[in-house]
Image: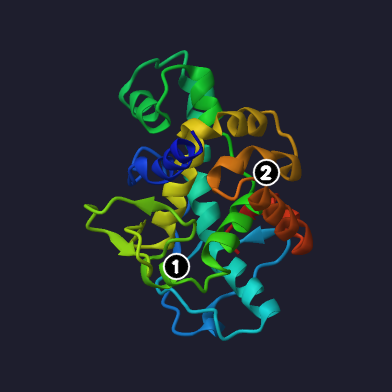
Amino acid sequence: MYKFIIFKVVFVLFSLTVIAQSIFLESFNPIYIDNKSIKDIQNHNNVYVRPLKYLNTPNFAELSVSEKKIKFINFILPSILLEKNKIKKAYDYILNNYEIKHNNDTINELFEYCNCDTKNCLLLCLKAQPNSIIIAQAAIESGWGTSRFFIEGNNLFGVHTQSNDPNKIKAKNSSPVYVKKYNSISESISHYLRTLASGYFYEQYRINRFNNINSIDLINYLSMYSIRRESYIEDLNSIIIYNNLLMYDNLELIYD
């Protein structure tokens, strides 16, 4: 039974196909940064974040621990907010148009994205995810931007894939384990957000997220993300608290 559960967890992590999220409207035109070094990663204040997209994936391994964490967060946070903003537009669209334009093309595409067929399910699916949890999971799964899967494949969240996927990286061990390779961290974030938004094992997470429980309590519903179960939740809790990640939950995108 335990092996079956582990298989299903891994399957959920790679079974949801990556989509371009063309159904979501882009509210911000990203500012593209051709970053050549770590120094090109811009800092953010505690109020807003500029809509930056970095063109190159840096290696954070040679930085001190404290600098590595700051630069890693500054690197991924704009892309997180840009992807979340697309989903927020879809959420608002459902709130304002579902009764008027029921079953139009946009809503049908959202049904497919969310793998459901009711308004309430769409709202559960499209509800915003806390930045603190996203950052914490990215930190764990990518080793704060130092893992081979992140450096070679922009894989922030340890998402697995199948052997016949042309966009894959093989783990360096004897077992036939592959992780997804993405074109950008934005694509990785998009896939991760959809996994939590529609994956079978995250239904209770979505329900409690919709009810606006705090991030520390909400992570308890992510035990199925990792075969480490409760140890994984403890690590998420420690990373969020120790690194004061809750302060990122209310940040918004803005042009300055």
User: Three-letter amino acid code at disc 1?
Assistant: Phe
First along the sequence among labels 1 and 2: 1
Q: Residues within 10 Å of mark 2 (few under 14, many from 20)?
A: many
Residue 236 visible, this angle: yes
The answer to which of 44 and 166 lies nearer the viewer is 166
Numbered circle sitting on residue 184: none
Dividing the image into 4 quarters, which one contains the C terminus? bottom right
Coordinates of residue 217 in the picture (x, y in percent):
74, 40
Numbered circle sitting on residue 150: 1
For the point 54% across and 45% down, which residue is it? 225
User: Three-letter amino acid code at disc 2?
Assistant: Ile
Coordinates of residue 91 in the picture (x, y in percent):
52, 32
Residue 27 visible, this angle: no
Residue 211: name its quadrant. Answer: top right
The answer to which of 42 and 3 lies nearer the viewer is 3
How far apart are labels 1 and 2 at the CA level? 23 Å
Quickly name the residue at label 2: 219
Coordinates of residue 251 in the picture (x, y in percent):
67, 54
- 149 left or right of 233 in image: left
- 93 left or right of 67 in image: left
What's the coloring here?
A: rainbow
Callout 1: SS: helix
Q: Examine the rendered structure and indicate whether residue 229 appears above or below residue 119.
A: below
Coordinates of residue 165 in the picture (x, y in percent):
24, 53
